[in-house]
Image (cartoon, grey):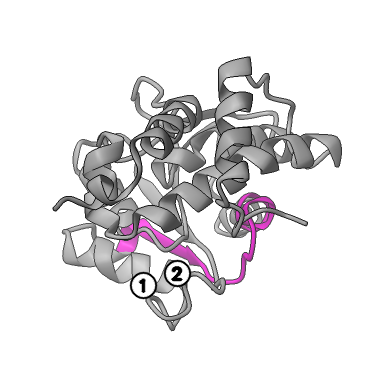
Amino acid sequence: MTAHATLPGDVLEDAEILWRFHRLDDELRPVDVAIGLGSHDGTVPVYAAELYHRGLFPWLVFTGANAPTTVERFPRGEAIHYREIALEHGVPESAILVEPKARHTGENIDLTRELLAAHGIQVQSALIVCRPYQQRRAYATAKRRWPEINILCSAIPQGLGEYLQTIGDPNRVVNMLVGDTQRLTIYADTGDAIPQEIPPEVAHAYERLVSKGYTQRLIR
């Protein structure tokens, strides 16, 4: 049985609506730097390494400390483990910078910006590499915190079913999808991200999933 087959059909349908909404998947082109956002998702550094080998950027920053959802998998910190994975996939050590302190997306951007400035690296464009369904929130946050640069977003090109199989925990992914949807509104209201229009079908899918108990990643 595949991972996504363990989800009820109606849950999978609503999760697919949120999945499509959060994926931006900008057309790839050369940028000054790629920023790999730390999380529980080990596909991020693998995909970032692939893009590095395509010659899309000379610098790759991994950013992230730990969260309750990542400390068991990446006990020494998300960015540190991501760096090691990228090295295993052929990215040279000289091309990687590590920012190991950020604990949320806003800090990912702010501390990466400071790190690059400290190394004298001028940035006019950046590619954010992250969990597939984190793209919209990452973009909205980055445009608020670093508005003067051109920002693209990308993630491993998998459909929801394949991604659920890769992660191996479908309920966790659905809870994260719901949480990221809520955060778009909350962070826009607090001024931590630029506003994003949420289509009615997305809002309704979110509400249905909340009513079914997918609330573990909601901000109370």
Q: Is residue 128 left or right of residue 124?
A: left
The reply to whether the C-beta atoms of the residues labelled 2 and 1 are less than 8 Å apart is yes
Is residue 106 at all visible to an observer of this figure? yes
Q: Position of residue 148 (x, y in %)?
A: 68, 28
Question: Is residue 209 placed above or below 68 in the rendered structure?
Answer: above
Q: Which residue is mark 1?
A: 81
- Whether residue 122 is visible, yes or no, is no
User: In this picture, is 92 found above or below 147?
Assistant: below
Could you tell me residue 216's position as x and y percent?
59, 59
Front-most of 174 and 62? 174
Query: Residue at the spot x=55%, y=51% of the render?
Result: 214
Q: Secondary structure at mark 1?
A: helix
Q: Is residue 88 magenta?
A: no
Secondary structure of the residue carrying tag 2 is: helix
Crowd class of label 1 (few under 14; some 14 to 19; many from 20; radius 10 Å): many
Would residue 121 appear left or right of 9 to someone viewing this image? right
The amino acid on which the numbered mark 1 sits, given as a three-letter code, is His
- Tag shown at residue 78: 2
Residue interval drawn in magenta: 94-111
Q: Quadrant of residue 9?
A: top left
In the depicted view, which residue is nearer to us: 120 or 41?
41
Q: Residue at x 74, y 35 (%)?
A: 185
Membership of 109 in magenta stretch = yes
What's the distance in space between the residues labelled 2 and 1, CA to CA? 5 Å
